[in-house]
Amino acid sequence: MFSLYQTPGRTAIVNDKELLFFSGYAYLGMNHEHGFLQLIHDGIERFGAVFPSSRISNTELSLYAETEKILTDLTQTTDTVLLQSGFTAGKATVEMIEAGSTIFQSPFCHPAIRIQSNSTLQFADWATETINSINHNKFSSAPVIMSDSVNQLTAEVYDFSFLNSIQQKIICIIDDSHGMGLLGKNGEGIIGTLPKNENIEYIITYSLSKALNIQAGAISCTNKNTADKIRKTSWYTAVTPPSPAMLFAFCKANLIYDQQREKLNRLKIELQNLLITKKDIRFHKDLPVFILPENLEEAYFSKKGMIISSFAYPDPKGKKINRAVINALHTSNDLQKLAMAIMID
């Protein structure tokens, strides 16, 4: 366990010692990107840090609608609802499920959208079972498929092409918190790879904090009626909205996001090439996450001046999952040191 007294970037200070930091979810390194921090400062001067008012007040801040429009365009959907956090967005989404609906919950669903036990099958087997169950049965209301887009604990990006084989009308809820801002040419997330079939209604829920460094959540919907319903719930009406200063920065930072995403992609490919011969390291070509074997644990890396991600999840009593997570602030020299530590073992 490491006690940190400031936000880490490419390094972290622990007991007055600087260690390389290969943990966390600040994929694009925005929390230490000077231009982005300046935009937040500009936003504070213009809007203050907090807008303590309901979104349904008669004094509405237009910035929120502007942000929703940007997210709608980015995700190629019909409408987006901005909420206080990714967890709030997930819970508001689940509330939209019609009572009595048949739920098909994947092997990996974040607690924000989880309403029953996750499937114990492998994702591909679960997908095949879901296809057969839906195509060979009749339902009083559209069945609901629920899943995360990315399993950051196993470095997987799930393949939703199986949805092409479903013949009935369905609702597909996907938590894209670890894809938004990271996946896709423009950081649009998982939506760019999803089948665009008329029988599928998508509800994409996500946090903006992971790659984009904005303390907020959102729900992007292909059906505007769904977005309208969400705006009538207490998740929307009774919660203080996200900081306008951060949303101002988000709206102005498109070029910075693109630059940081390009940097991360180069670094990610570089480290993948360095580790390609190490067969017990697992990674996905689109993710900056590298799954390490059990014997490469945090004490080993600490001795080499590095911090990795190492904790048991979702069961805190289970085995620790060891991962190296890189971000756009790292340098080629940092990756060389990490790869050397891994390959020496």
Image: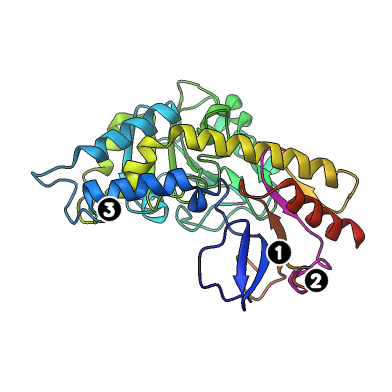
Give the residues in magenta: 285-301
Q: Nearer the viewer, residue 172 or 149?
A: 149
Alpha carbon distance from label 1 to label 2: 14 Å
Q: Residues within 10 Å of mark 1 (few under 14, many from 20)?
A: some
Which three-letter amino acid code belongs to the residue tagged 1? Ile
Please indicate, yes or no, whether residue 97 appears anywhere in the rendered image. no
The residue tagged 1 is: 321
Whichever of labels 1 and 2 marks the residue nearer the N terminus, that label is: 2
Q: Secondary structure at mark 2?
A: helix
Q: Magenta segment: does it hold 36?
A: no
Q: Given contact means CB atoms under 8 Å apart, are the residues at marks 1 and 2 in contact?
A: no
Q: Is residue 108 left or right of residue 338?
A: left
Q: Nearer the viewer, residue 61 or 178?
A: 61
Which three-letter amino acid code belongs to the residue tagged 2? Tyr
Q: Secondary structure at mark 1?
A: strand
Instruction: Give the label, 3 or 1, closer to the camera.
Output: 1
Q: Which disc is residue 235 wearing?
A: 3
Which residue is at a point 50% across and 68% down the rendered structure image? 6
Alpha carbon distance from label 3 to label 2: 44 Å
Please indicate, yes or no, whether residue 282 appears anywhere in the rendered image. yes
Is residue 302 depicted above or below 45 in this figure?
Answer: below
Instruction: Give the label, 3 or 2, closer to the camera.
Output: 2
**In which quadrant will I find the N terminus?**
bottom right
Which three-letter amino acid code belongs to the residue tagged 3? Trp
Q: Magenta segment: does it hold 297?
A: yes
x, y percent for residue 31:
49, 53
Instruction: Give the label, 1 or 2, closer to the camera.
Output: 2
Q: Residues within 10 Å of mark 2 (few under 14, many from 20)?
A: some
Q: Residues within 10 Å of mark 3 (few under 14, many from 20)?
A: some
x, y percent for residue 155:
69, 48
The residue tagged 2 is: 300
